[in-house]
Image: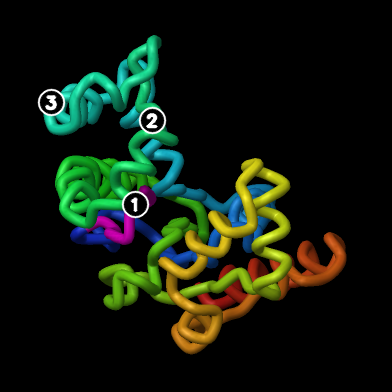
Amino acid sequence: MGTALPPSDPHAGRRGLLIGLTGGIGSGKSTVADLFAAHGATVIDTDAIAHELTGPTGAAMPAIRAAFGDRVAKADGSLDRDVMREIAFGDPAARTRLEAILHPMIRAESQRRIGASRSPYTVLVVPLLVESGDRAGGVDRIVVVDCPVESQIERVMRRSGLTRERAESILAAQASRAQRLAAADDVIDNGGAPQALAAQVDALHRRYVESQ
């Protein structure tokens, strides 16, 4: 349910590069984003914004409940993501309705945060960036977090408690590993040791700062 849509004017009011960070489910995007943040970069995660919008007092919840009924809301008023995922996964029209509610809100909030960024470069985490097919509407560079598909499946099963069949079906609905790599300006290999991952982020951080 993450967005593939970036802000309509990603450069408005912002200094420095805008880096689009993406990768398939279970690839390690969040870990990489945290490493960039540790270097002082502003990190804007579209999935995190979506969670805020669908929280107990989230701005998107009234429209979502109106569109799909109270069954998609938990007792605290937040989105029941498991129920919504089942609805959207099996019904393309339902997914389109959900995206029509969430995407404009995510876009507006992303634009606000990008405009407020004053770090040397800004990292916009967009899980479905490659699937959007438009270089996220204006990011300067695309960074793909890459790892073997089997590693993705194992991480998703371990993290979310999903069956292998379900994990594989989620991966099948996303861009392929080859498609993401073809779209990448920079690739971070997350198939090895944690220290190797940190070293790759360090190198990219230096490159992005020096390019200003």
**Residue 42 can be seen, yes or no:** yes
| Residue 69 locus on image (x, y percent) | 19, 24
Closer to us: 109 or 42: 109
**Left or right of 183 in this view: 33:** right
Queried whether the magenta region covers residue 5, the answer comes back as yes
Which comes sooner in the sequence, label 2 or label 1? 2
Bounds of the magenta span?
1-7
Q: Amino acid at mark 3?
A: Ala
Q: Residues within 10 Å of mark 2 (few under 14, many from 20)?
A: some
Q: Residue at x 19, y 31 (%)?
A: 68
**Colour mode of the rendering:** rainbow
**Left or right of 87 in this view: 120:** right
Q: Amino acid at mark 1?
A: Phe
Q: Which mark is residue 52?
A: 2
Closer to us: 181 or 84: 84
Q: Main secondary structure of the magenta part?
A: loop
Instruction: Quickly name the residue at label 1.
Output: 89
Q: Is residue 7 above or below residue 80?
A: below
Looking at the rendered structure, the secondary structure element under dot 3 is helix
Q: Is residue 195 above or below residue 135?
A: above
**Residue 39 can be seen, yes or no:** no
